[in-house]
Amino acid sequence: MSFNPRSRNFIALPSTSGVLTRRVIAYLFDVVFIALFGGLLFWAVAFVNIFTFGLLHGLFAFVALAPMLYATLTIAGRHGATWGMRMMAIGYRDEDGRLPSLAQAFAVSFLFYFTFWATGGLILLVALLSSRHRTLHDILAGLVMIRTDGAGWAL
């Protein structure tokens, strides 16, 4: 799907100026939230393993998925943003101005973590060169990061 202003579903997207700096700060907030979520998940799995005598130790694999679960479920939510993004008044929209679907949220989350790991973070330099400061995972998922100033979003 491409950005088409003549589309009957077209909604003029809000400004993308200042989004890059806000994204970095939002991710720092998200790292804290992910650590808390991952910690709670770890202790919940450990508690379950005490009562099953370690039979469910395979559940610890889900702790490693905590960052992707957090990002996918919050981006696919009613605000189209993680908690860190909401704190910085930014969020995702698709190229027609709609909230991201669950599939788009999963794609952007998976692609972010995979490409970030595979390139040591260098892939994020794409945002400095692309229009609307879109990262590669935004482009491939068909999403745009926008400012949501004045939208009254809360955690």
Image: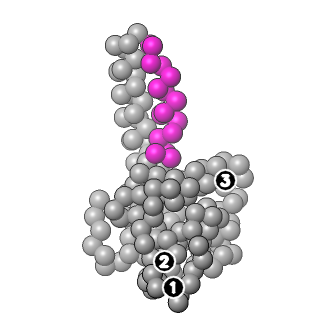
- Which residue is identified by label 3? 115
Residue toward you, 21 or 86: 86
- Which residue is identified by label 2? 96
Query: Local crowd at mark 2 within 10 Å, few (<14), some, or many (≥20)?
Result: many
Query: Local crowd at mark 3 within 10 Å, few (<14), some, or many (≥20)?
Result: some
Query: Local crowd at mark 1 within 10 Å, few (<14), some, or many (≥20)?
Result: few
Residue 84 image position (x, y, % from top left) = 41, 59
In the rendered structure, the answer to whether residue 6 lies left or right of residue 47 reads: right
- Residue at the image point whose x is 63% and y is 64% from the top: 140
Name the secondary structure under disc 3: helix
Instruction: Name which residue type carries label 3.
Output: Thr
Residue 7: assigned label: 1
- Residue at the image point whose x is 52% and y is 75% from the top: 95
**Above or below, comparing residue 88 to residue 35 in the picture:** below
Distance between the Cα atoms at labels 2 and 3? 25 Å
Residue toward you, 128 or 56: 56
**Above or below, comparing residue 65 to residue 139 in the picture:** above
Instruction: Name which residue type carries label 1.
Output: Ser
Distance between the Cα atoms at labels 2 and 1? 8 Å
Check if mark 3's residue and mark 1's residue have beta carbons within 8 Å: no
Segment colored magenta: 54-69
